[in-house]
Image (cartoon, coloured by chain):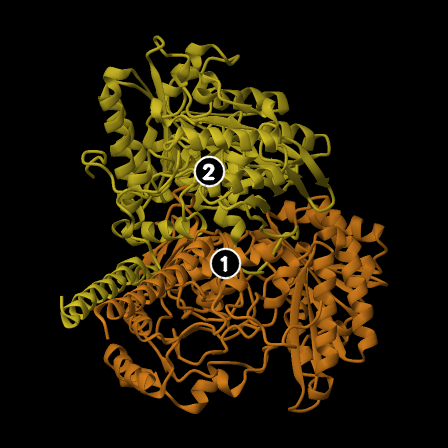
Chain colours: A orange, B yellow
Amino acid sequence: MTPESNFAKNSAFTFSIVFSCVLAYWFGSKRPDKVSLLSTTPLSSVDTKGPKHNTSPTNLEACWTDMVSIVDKEHVSTEEGDLQSHSGSDWSSYTTKDSERPFMIVSPSTTEEVSEIMKVCHTRKIPVTGYSGGTSLEGHFSATRGGICVDFSRMDKILKLHKEDLDVIVQPALGWELLNEELGKEGLFFPPDPGPGAMIGGMVGTGCSGTNAYRYGTMRDWVLSLTVVLADGTVIKTRQRPRKSSAGYDLTRMFIGSEGTLGLVTEATLKITVKPKHESVAVTSFGTIREAAECVSRVVGEGVPIAAVEILDDVQMRCINESGSTSRTWKEVPTLFFKFSGTQSAVKESIGLVQKLAKSKGSKSFDFAKDADEAAELWSARKEALWSVMAKRRDESDHVWTTDVAVPISRLPDIIEETKEDMASSGLLAAMVGHVGDGNFHAILLFNDKERETAEAVVHRMVKRAVEMEGTVTGEHGVGLIKRDYLAHEMGETTVDAMRKLKQAFDPLCLLNCDKIVRVQKAKAGEVQPW
Amino acid sequence: MTPESNFAKNSAFTFSIVFSCVLAYWFGSKRPDKVSLLSTTPLSSVDTKGPKHNTSPTNLEACWTDMVSIVDKEHVSTEEGDLQSHSGSDWSSYTTKDSERPFMIVSPSTTEEVSEIMKVCHTRKIPVTGYSGGTSLEGHFSATRGGICVDFSRMDKILKLHKEDLDVIVQPALGWELLNEELGKEGLFFPPDPGPGAMIGGMVGTGCSGTNAYRYGTMRDWVLSLTVVLADGTVIKTRQRPRKSSAGYDLTRMFIGSEGTLGLVTEATLKITVKPKHESVAVTSFGTIREAAECVSRVVGEGVPIAAVEILDDVQMRCINESGSTSRTWKEVPTLFFKFSGTQSAVKESIGLVQKLAKSKGSKSFDFAKDADEAAELWSARKEALWSVMAKRRDESDHVWTTDVAVPISRLPDIIEETKEDMASSGLLAAMVGHVGDGNFHAILLFNDKERETAEAVVHRMVKRAVEMEGTVTGEHGVGLIKRDYLAHEMGETTVDAMRKLKQAFDPLCLLNCDKIVRVQKAKAGEVQPW
């Protein structure tokens, strides 16, 4: 070999290395750089293989040892029953697959422990799902990528009540019913009233509401500040305690409704308010569901001060009668339940206004409570709604699907009427109940495995109807896995891409409740129902 | 040269290239990768040279040509007077430097044009500041890095009123006063009431409020949906129109209070409400400011339904008398202005309750309006507050500094008393006025250039006091440049790092109102006042 040929060979070698380096730099750095200069994260820009977690048995076992050193052995569980109860429920519309269970449940007792847990999981690239009440409905806490479940049950205290400031600092596994029991002793209360059993952590996660939302707003209006552990274990406190602040980005509200995908809430400072001096209830029934819905539209549009208004359809009223859980027998027709609060004279005035408007829309009856006992009796029917349908399950193979949408109030009569007809013709036992003052209502469907496709189709059409009427695919239940692919139809692809950008910024490894709200990996063929 | 030595030399060369490549890969990609796996962006991880903009004359001139092709020549201005009025104001507490003016003002007329503008600026790396009413106070629209100013004055319309749904779609340069004039014709209104002249775009930007916030909440509670142009020109619409939704991250609220740093708002769907049937006003005066503040604490703590409560101190009342702008002469003592709304009987009931509580706190007088004219007359004093202090300017070299903080209501008497004493001993003409029902109040200071340091020190101590009382450095004016370095004291360094992460995610080139809310470059020595 001549020196020249040797040089030429080496030059070629060198050139190929330099070229490879340039290529590597281009693809490994420049290209992602171009993507990283964008303000959104389109799904097309995301690694097709999905997040790079490490859930190998070795890594998980090593993680078990780490967890034991943080919280002690008695607070780590790998028992099958625990894993099952922490990844799905009977009342959820999503059926958790066997592969979607966590490897273990860890129960920390402090913010610091949660931070330590997240640091380990961040280093080990192990996905994490948070768990408090477990009452959510859309597959929110299925462990789609395995990993560990952080159970907050040991963090269930009221830490500090500031009575004069009308705020209270609580831990995530405190139930709202227990909180209100305690606050009630001081003449105070916390308005958001989701399903029984819900806890503050999950209530923040779903941005929940309930019957009180019409008068008092949703969870988004009742949280002053959150302490949150981020995906890498960093602890932040979004704000101090003043009722009002314009100090920077609204991180508090960024976490509310984020379904545990941006951080784990370990403490919340909640606004509370003074219990109204006086409450009353009125119940009015109609010949058709459209008349009932039109009555709601009128009452809302005229700004009559009501505390809540709930619609229950004929099927729902029949279920309540058949369950025998309330002391009176109800007419099995579309019915509105109104709640009023304020001073005695203001309540009286409002009841009079509602009665007049109901009459103008063709109400068949109008009962109002003469005292607190009667008010409680009337309202009890509303409280029994969901359970009375669940009681109709024929056997163990029957499931209940509870779903919700919301539309601008002027479209309420249309969507309620059309959905009602659709449900009736489906052949399923299907009831309608809802917080109609917000244009929000639920469908409760009873179905068995054979009827699943029918139920899915009813829900799909209801969601589509809501979107086409300028509404939302979920008024208060949240997205989870079930409503995820509907978001782009509701708000557009670029908006979902912006949501994905937010997720990616705070949790680049997709450790926290991965796959919820936005996809981080393309759907498989046939996985998404055609619109 | 032997082949061996040649090979050795080439090997060494090759090695050095490979080594350089590895190093380049490590520093150019791996290191930033490690940072990009974090959930926050500490200032220490940011390029010390700051954002890489291109504001070279050549680039800006080429940009001028681009802008003219998007909006036509008549809607692009480089006139000195325009540049000055679009980067600062007489009433702002920040004095804009000559270097902090934009190169040109561009006035688009559609969302599409704004998107085109941002696409050009993103490609050319030119910073952008949005402008609507220009009434903000903390240096919000100073063009700290030059570039272009997007003036929304051509986008000032009400696009669609949905009367039955109680919402209205508007453009960013619509003023809230004009909006309410139009809504008033239908018996409707939009509650947020910041300073006169404020427009929807800026009101979204600062997350503003005003006297109505105690009863109705702030801007954060009255926006349903936003159309926003992001830094790279992507257009997103955060939601449709239902009153309530749990569909994904709360992008709407992410933009409210983001001071034009995350996107440019081109359309807003606002909630509106029905005008209360009846309103009244009561005015009560006290011997000391503490007594007045204690009265507010009691009224709020007892949950008496009031629409607003404002405090005006003795200095403020004197300024109003001296300005001669109201028809009556007021006692020059600490005074509370209460507003009531609701049905006639409810208002009467509430006035009685407030009168009783005021008396128990030592009120010296209690006047309430017998009719609408008297109510307007009483409230007029509150409306004249800021202008009556501005009227006291001795000459052109006098400035007015309007600042605000908020604390939990129980700390209001303490902070008001201490701040009042501090202001009195400063020797400045300094008045206090505020939306005390939210624990929020303003100090209005008159000062000339010689007195600037005294004024700065008074404001600094007031902010520090608020933070130490678990309050916020700004209740409603926003952060801008002036309150930026206080954020870490209020909420902790990691929380500010999380805010920086958010900014970086949506605007990686820091094009949109760069330097506001969070620093993206380390402060120079002496730039930050010691805490």
Pinpoint residue B47: horizontal percent, then vertical percent. Answer: 29, 47
Residue A41, numbered circle: 1
The quadrant where residue A467 appears: bottom right
**Considering only vertical position in the picture, is A261 above or below A494?**
below
Residue B431 visible within the image = no
| Image mark 2: chain | B
**Considering only vertical position in the picture, is A465 above or below A522?**
above
At a point 50% along the width and 43% down the height, the residue shown is B263
Q: Residue furthest top?
A: B395
Q: Is residue B82 left or right of residue B315?
A: right
Q: CA distance from mark 2 to mark 1?
A: 27 Å
The quadrant where residue A420 appears: bottom right
Q: Quadrant of the N terminus of chain B?
A: bottom left
Pinpoint residue B286: horizontal percent, then vertical percent. Answer: 38, 26
**Considering only vertical position in the picture, is A519 above or below B151?**
below
Q: Quadrant of the C terminus of chain B?
A: top left
Q: Secondary structure at mark 2?
A: helix
Residue B206, numbered circle: 2
Q: Is residue A169 left or right of residue B454?
A: right
At a point 52% along the width and 81% down the height, the residue shown is A88
Looking at the rendered image, the disc whose residue lies closer to the viewer, 2 or 1, is 1
At a point 65% along the width and 47% down the height, the residue shown is A305
At a point 37% along the width and 33% down the height, the residue shown is B145
Q: Amino acid at mark 1?
A: Thr
